[in-house]
Image (cartoon, rainbow, N blue to C red):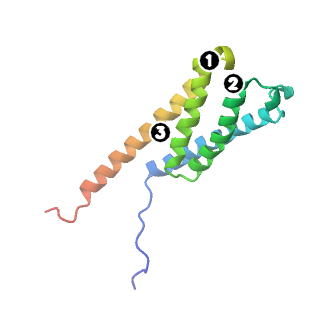
Amino acid sequence: MLHDSAHVPKPSLTEVLFGWFLRLVSASCFWFALNYWAMLIGFSHGGAGRFDLLPPEWRAAATALAVVYPVAAIGLWLLVSWGPVVWVVAAAIEIAVHEFYPGIFGARPLLFVLHGAVAVTFVLFRAALFYQRLRQARKVRVDSP
């Protein structure tokens, strides 16, 4: 007897590892979001980072990151295509404020390195998946002799 449903291929090891990688990045985005929210509500930094006590530059940056990071975390956790895009926006904002305005926001060179490492790892995973799908498409052809 034949099954009613279509056969769904098993994900490759690369696809599984890529999913775990995205979920790990999602957890770190959620951690960053919690840190920004804790700062804005006065829970961390001894209450000195409360929204009403911050200078306007910090208000804008911290509020934007407190909103964008949880959205990126959800998108990455759900493995949807817009998750990495929102993460790039959040990482770009955070890198920009710390690299271009170190007098206001402080210099955090490790942050640049970590975001860069995540971006390079993401590109390498996407290249491996592209190569894997290209090989698979060449191998399985209905019209091949």
Position of residue 56 in the picture relative to residue 142 (left or right): right
In front of the other: label 1 or label 2?
Answer: 2
State how far apart marks 1 and 2 are (Cα). Answer: 10 Å
Q: Which quadrant of the figure contains the N terminus?
A: bottom left
Please tell me the numbered disc located at residue 140. none
State which tag comes first along the sequence, 3 or 1. Answer: 1
At which x and y percent is residue 92?
55, 30
> Residue drawn at (56%, 47%), measured in percent from left and top?
76
Q: As displayed, is residue 16 above or below residue 61?
A: below
The residue type indicated by label 2 comes to: Glu
Give the residue type at disc 1: Tyr
Q: Is residue 91 above or below residue 2?
A: above
Q: Residue shown at 61%/24% (left/top)?
A: 97
**Disc number lying in front (3 or 1):** 1
Q: Are marks 1 and 2 in contact (CB under 8 Å)?
A: yes
Q: Earlier in the sequence, mark 2 or mark 3?
A: 2
- Residue bearing the label numbered 2: 57
- Which residue in the structure is indicated by mark 3? 122
SS of the residue at dot 3?
Answer: helix
Q: Position of residue 5 (x, y in %)?
A: 44, 76
Residue at (57, 18) in percent of width and height: 100
Residue reaching furthest top? 103
Q: Residue at x 57, y 33 (%)?
A: 91
- Quadrant where the C terminus sits is bottom left
Badge nearest the viewer, 2 or 3 = 2
- Label 3 Cα crowd, 10 Å radius (few <14 / some 14-19 / many 20+): some
Residues packed near mark 2 inside 10 Å, few (<14), some (14 to 19) or many (20 plus): few
Task: Tell me the kind of residue under disc 3.
Answer: Phe
